[in-house]
Amino acid sequence: MYIYNVTTNIEESAHDEWLIWMREVHIPDVLATGKFLNAKMSKILIEEDMGGVSYSVQFTTLSREVLESYYSEDAPRLREDAHKKFPNKFVSFRTEMEVVSEH
């Protein structure tokens, strides 16, 4: 299994609206692609020097191939939706992880 992690720092001015949008629109849209088994959203508890609030969203998928198909078929549209809705209000970075063991 693989985890596609998206870490985002959102400006305070857009935080509340962004959080609702993430829960009600964006995460459900990503899951609706059928490429992920589930998603977990966590607030990062360290204060950022750059201000804002940071979150991590972890999407679980079965294979690297499925993740690659998400990148080519779905990610550009979904990323553009976020940039249109919250222009210049956030910064995100992505990390891929392979699950080695679960306990």
Image (cartoon, rainbow, N blue to C red):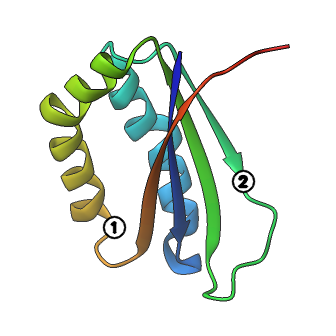
**Residue 31 on image: x %, y %:** 40, 22
Q: Residue at x 14, y 33 (%)?
A: 72
Left or right: residue 94 versus residue 68 is right
Residue bearing the label numbered 1: 86
Residue 33 in sight: no
Vertical side of 43 occupied by 32: above or below: above
**Residue 8 on image: x %, y %:** 52, 61
**Residue 25 on image: x %, y %:** 39, 37
- Quadrant in which residue 69 is drawn: top left
Task: Give the label on residue 43, or none.
Answer: 2
- Identify the residue at the far front of this view: 100
Q: Residue at x 53, y 79 (%)?
A: 13
- The span from disc 2 to disc 1 (Cα, nearest Å) is 19 Å
- Identify the residue at the far right of this view: 103
Task: Give the label on residue 5, or none.
Answer: none
- Quadrant in which residue 12 is drawn: bottom right
Vertical side of 90 occupied by 43: above or below: above
Type of residue at label 1? Phe
Q: Residue at x 36, y 22 (%)?
A: 64
Q: Circle 1: is it few (<14), some (14-19), or many (20+) Cα within 10 Å?
A: some
Q: Circle 2: is it few (<14), some (14-19), or many (20+) Cα within 10 Å?
A: few
